[in-house]
Structure formats: C-alpha cells, structure tokens
Amino acid sequence: MTPSAKPQYDVIVLGVGAMGSSACYHLAKAGKTVLGLEQYGVAHSLGSSHGKTRMVRKAYFEHPNYVPLLHRSYELWDELGAAVGRSLFHRSGVIVLGPEAKAEGVDVLAGVKASATEHNLPIEVLSREECHKRFPCIHVLEGYVGVYEADAGYVEVEAAITAYIDQARKHGADLRFEERVLSWQSLPDGTVTVTTAHGIFTASRLVVTAGAWSSSVLATPSLQVQVHRVPLFWYEPAPTAEGQLIMTTTMPCFAIDLPTGFVYGFPYAKGEGMKIAPHVPGATIDNPAALHREVLPGEVDPVRTCVNSCFPGLQEHPATSAVCMYTMSKDGNFIIDTHPDYTNVVFAAGFSGHGYKFAPVIGEILCDLALSGTTAHPIEFLRLR
C-alpha cells in the first residue's frame, strides 16, 4: 500500500470466536468498517469457545476486581438476547460447594464470600443439610457447605457466538471464515496489513483475539501464556429413582472443590446430558492446531470421582466427551492491552479457563482501546505484567 492509499477497513479483527465476535459487533455498532478473519468455521469446536455451555457468576472467587466487569457483561448478555429474540443467558443459579474449613490451598468459598461482601452481592450460605433439601440430586460430602448465588447460571456457547456474528453483520461487518492469517505487519504510516491465503487487507487498527494461537500471532516476548488441554464430559442419568431426580428437579449449575481437583457442571439437558468437567489445566500444548481431540487415559478421573461421590443418579461412564484448551497466564488473570511495540494493535489473551462469561464486555473494551486507546472499564489489573 502506498503512503497515500486509504486503508480498506477501519479495523481488522483476527480471530472470531467468543471475544472476536463480540469485538466485531461493538466496532461495527460504533459505525466502523470491520473485517473479521477466522481460520475455522462459524462457532467451531477447534479452539476454546465450544462445549455448549459456560458458567456465568458474579460472586467471583478468582478476584473481586472482576465484579465490575461482570456487572457490565450481564447487561450485555441480556442486550444480546433481546436483539436475537431469545435468552442466551439462563439464570439457573450456581451452587459452589467446598470444605467448611479448608486447611491449605485456595479457599474457594472464602473467595466467593469476599467478592460478595465487597460488592454487596446477594448470596446464601447453606449447610450440608440445607443443600440436600434444596438440591436433592446433589450428594454433598461430609464436612462440606455451599454458597448459592441465584443471579447466576449459564450461557449457550455456540449460539451466543453465532448471535454476535449475526448482529455484527447486521451492522455492516465483513466476517470471513475458513480464512487463515499468514502474517500481519504494522507499517510506519500508522496502518496495518494482514495477509491471508486469499489476499492482503489493510486497516487503521488491528485487534487480535486469537485464543490458543495468541503467542504465535502476537509474536512478542511480553506475552507469556501457556496452552493446556482440558477435557469435557456429558453424562446420562441412571435408570433409577435418583436418576429420575436429575431429570425432573430444578438444578443449578455447580462447582465443587474436591480434594482430587475442582470440578464444575451444569443442569441436565434432554438430548445433551449433564455436562461435568475438571477446572484444572491438563497437559501443555505446543501446537494448538495439532491438539489430540480424544480424551486421554486418566483425564476423566477427577470427574469420575465427582460423579461417584456427589451424583449417584448418573451413569458410571460419560456418554460423550470433547477436548477444549485453556490459555493460561502466569497468574491466572486475563491480559488485555495495547501491543508493546505497536500502538495501533490491541489484544486480549490468557483467559485462563474463566474468560467466556466476560466476552460481551471484553468486546466493548477492545472496541474502546482500538478506537481511542483507552477505556472507562477498570482493567489496569489485566494489563501486560
């Protein structure tokens, strides 16, 4: 491109999964010309934005600083549902179970209570007996208690991404799938070029939301993340009275801090089963494109322990499974910032297995950063570090 040539787009977005589709929508809604490039198909299952459901909660044990972002994310999830004419965020409630007194390691229940106290969030602390009475299909371990958050639940993963893609296109975004980016370059004249197998595109700004591919795409030593494999499982109810309870009683999402690992799951859905997964980074992955998609020996063990201990109404073995990826930062917090070498390139990465629920507000933040270089959202704790 010659110095006098006008860029084809205001902004190019690399990666159109959860974060990228949201960014494309917010940028297009702001009246900008947007090109979104995705190496795979719409709402594909080859990255970290699949698996049918993701949990959404405000009483955030990871850190209270996330709560203001969650307030905004809740608003935007509801706005997206209104735009497409149906709810995508289902407020089933979330019950977090853990030892009443934890001697070592991260005290998840203490973290939930701390966030709730700091931000005045309504929660209920339930004894083991109260948990059994409220949620009879969950067997709560001896010495465990629960914290229940009613204003929480789950979002439909692939449907939400598809909704953001549709809404971005309604606002004029040019979104292209099955188009792998080969390279990008920030030029001295303040523009960027992106080369794909199908052509060369130019823009004034670049947004990178490349998920597990972030390190190779951004190519900066400042971004230190590691990709891990994580399995997902779906169980069917057993043909027993306890299995019938799982299918017929109202059940919240759940997270259980077990000695064998932190496990989370979702209410039973007819035709899908009951999703349960370990919230523990597995083996490291050097090449996300070469991820082995079958569950490996031993990966089901933490979930099997959870099922055997807490869900007597489920069948012993999972009916189906899938493999996802966590892109872990060193401290488990997201990384959202301007590229250290190029002021016209912004990115979001390192979501560390707990980012999907923030997708609406992350897109809004990236829109702010791309267009003005700053945002009113409190993200200083998420900058490069």
Image (spheres, rainbow, N blue to C red):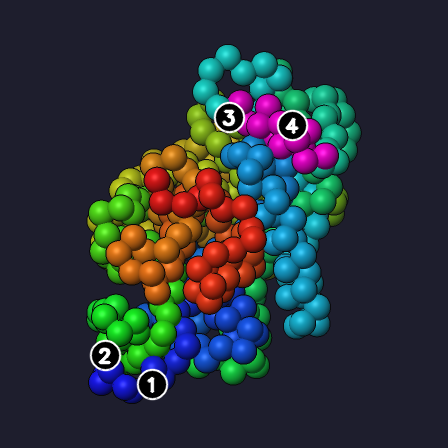
User: Residue at image x 71%, y 36%?
Assistant: 121
- Estimate how packed mark 4 is, as few (under 14), some (14 to 19) or many (20 or more) residues with alpha carbons within 10 Å: many
Numbered mark located on residue 6 in the image: 1
Q: Which residue is mark 2?
A: 197
Q: Which residue is mark 4?
A: 113
Q: Position of residue 156 (x, y in %)?
A: 58, 59
Relative placement, left or right, of 221 versus 303 is: left
Considering only order in the chain, which callout, 4 or 1, is on the residue closer to the N terminus? 1
Q: Which residues are magenta?
A: 107-120
Q: CA distance from mark 2 to mark 3?
A: 47 Å
Q: Which residue is mark 3?
A: 258
Considering only order in the chain, which callout, 2 or 4, is on the residue closer to the N terminus? 4
Name the magenta segment's main secondary structure: helix
Q: CA distance from mark 1 to mark 4?
A: 53 Å
Tag 4: amino acid = Lys
Tag 3: amino acid = Leu
Tag 1: amino acid = Lys
Determine whether label 1 and label 4 are within 8 Å by CB: no
Q: Nearer the viewer, mark 1 or mark 2?
A: 1
Relative placement, left or right, of 74 versus 335 is: right
Quarter of the rendering occupied by the C terminus: top left
Q: Is residue 29 above or below residue 365?
A: below
Q: CA distance from mark 4 to mark 2?
A: 50 Å
Residues 321 and 314: in front is: 321
- Estimate how packed mark 1 is, as few (under 14), some (14 to 19) or many (20 or more) residues with alpha carbons within 10 Å: few
Determine whether label 1 and label 2 are within 8 Å by CB: no
Q: Nearer the viewer, mark 2 or mark 3?
A: 2
Quarter of the rendering occupied by the N terminus: bottom left
